Image (spheres, grey):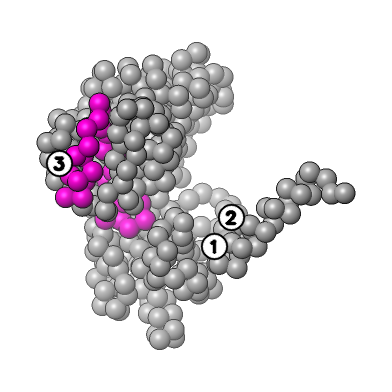
Amino acid sequence: MSSAAQRLDGLLRGDLDALHARSLYRVRRLVEGPQGAELLMDGRRYLNFSSNDYLGLAAHPALRDAARHALDQYGVGSGAAHLITGHTRAHAALEEELAVFVQRPRALLFSSGYMANLGLAGALVSRGDCIVEDRLNHASLLDAGLLCGARFSRYTHADPAALRQRLTRPAKRTLVMTDGVFSMDGDLAPLPALARTAGAAGAFLMVDDAHGVGVLGDHGRGSLEHFALGMAEVPVLMGTLGKALGTCGAFVAGSDALIESLIQHARTYIYTTAPPACLAEATRAALKLAQGESWRRAHLFRLIRHFRSGAAALGLPVMDSISAIQPLLLGDAQKAILISDKLRAHGIFAAAIRPPTVPIGRARLRITLTAAHREEHIERLLAVLEQIVKHSR
Ligand SMILES: *Cc1c(COP(=O)(O)O)cnc(C)c1O
């Protein structure tokens, strides 16, 4: 008779084989050394077009110095949750600086964006309430909607009229949640129209600006700065630290009442160990650079324009994106993998994104640009893409 472990493996193997057969099996690659325009991965050097380190800060000496210094001061572990003994002066200072950065009274740190989204949805709505989301929202927002106990529905991507239809059924409270910049398409949510629609229905708009913070707006404050929106229109703002700010973690920013409510009720805040203080200090250094070195954004946007015009000239399927996320829409998963493999053979890494991360038939090459790239890196990417596309036609 087979053991429980053998029976479980039998079940799991069947599922894994099915993923393989559908080109949906995921593997991890082994990175050695820091993030950057070039990456040492699986023993080979690649030109890296798959990082969310949009401002090129993840390996910056100022962040390393800040982390090292804090390491000596605080040690490594925070020892406990924020509400017990894990909340250090470093965390408090970072929260204050984040609040000033996004021009809101307060900000609250979370260990990750995923946890921030789960925590805030659970704290703000529950049974009897309503949560409405863009269909293409990040998985963490969709999971937050499904898990929080409120009535959950989704509207057509970036469509304020579709949102309006979802807001007709009465609820005690309605929370509308959207990505600011959509993580797999790179397009911006039509935030002014969404804010008007939500406001007119008495609903509250929450924006997850993981890919906007640090990148968009003249000061890098994100999608809300890009659209000149404030707390009046978007009372709940979430941003992550693991992308443009180059570290790890997330924050929610808003009114004092909002932040105090999250401290009381957000389970992913309360029941988890505080992130290390050295991470908070490194993020403070990143925030300084993101604010002080606007050339990083200017350079990034030059690269984005360069890539888009070059790719369009080659007839490549660019998408409607002004952000650092510049996907090429290829359709089926196998084609996306084929092109990603061919790029890799030429020393270029750009990840193929497949279902269920994106809808079936909308697999793509997700190219991301960062301030660490140089013009010649874009030239090289375009030249190799041209060669690959020519051969596959
Ligand atoms: C990356 C991302 C998250 C998750 O943030 P983590 O800090 O990586 O957990 C949430 N929302 C969006 C839109 C993201 O792109």
Residue at 41% from the left image edge and 58% from the top image edge: 358
Per the rendering, the mark at residue 16 is none
**What secondary structure is marked by label 1?**
loop
Location of residue 355 in the rendering, given as x and y in whole percent from the top left corner = 46, 60
Q: Residues within 10 Å of mark 2 (few under 14, many from 20)?
A: few
Instruction: Tell me where the magenta segment starts and ends, as one range.
Output: 161-187
Return the disc, 2 or 3, that comes first in the chain's sequence.
2
Q: Is residue 141 above or below residue 354?
A: above
Q: Nearer the viewer, residue 95 or 230?
A: 230
Task: Determine the image quadrant of residue 254.
Answer: top left
The residue indicated by pointer 3 is 197
Residue at 73% from the left image edge and 48% from the top image edge: 8
Three-letter code for the amino acid on which mark 2 is drawn: Arg
The residue indicated by pointer 1 is 24
How far is mark 2 from mark 1, CA to CA? 13 Å
Per the rendering, the mark at residue 28 is 2
Closer mark to the observer between disc 2 and disc 1: 1
Three-letter code for the amino acid on which mark 3 is drawn: Thr
Closer mark to the observer between disc 2 and disc 3: 3
Residue 174 sits inside the magenta stretch: yes
Three-letter code for the amino acid on which mark 1 is drawn: Leu
Residue at 68% from the left image edge and 53% from the top image edge: 12
How far is mark 2 from mark 3, CA to CA? 42 Å
**What secondary structure is marked by label 3?**
helix
In screen coordinates, is 19 left or right of 125?
right
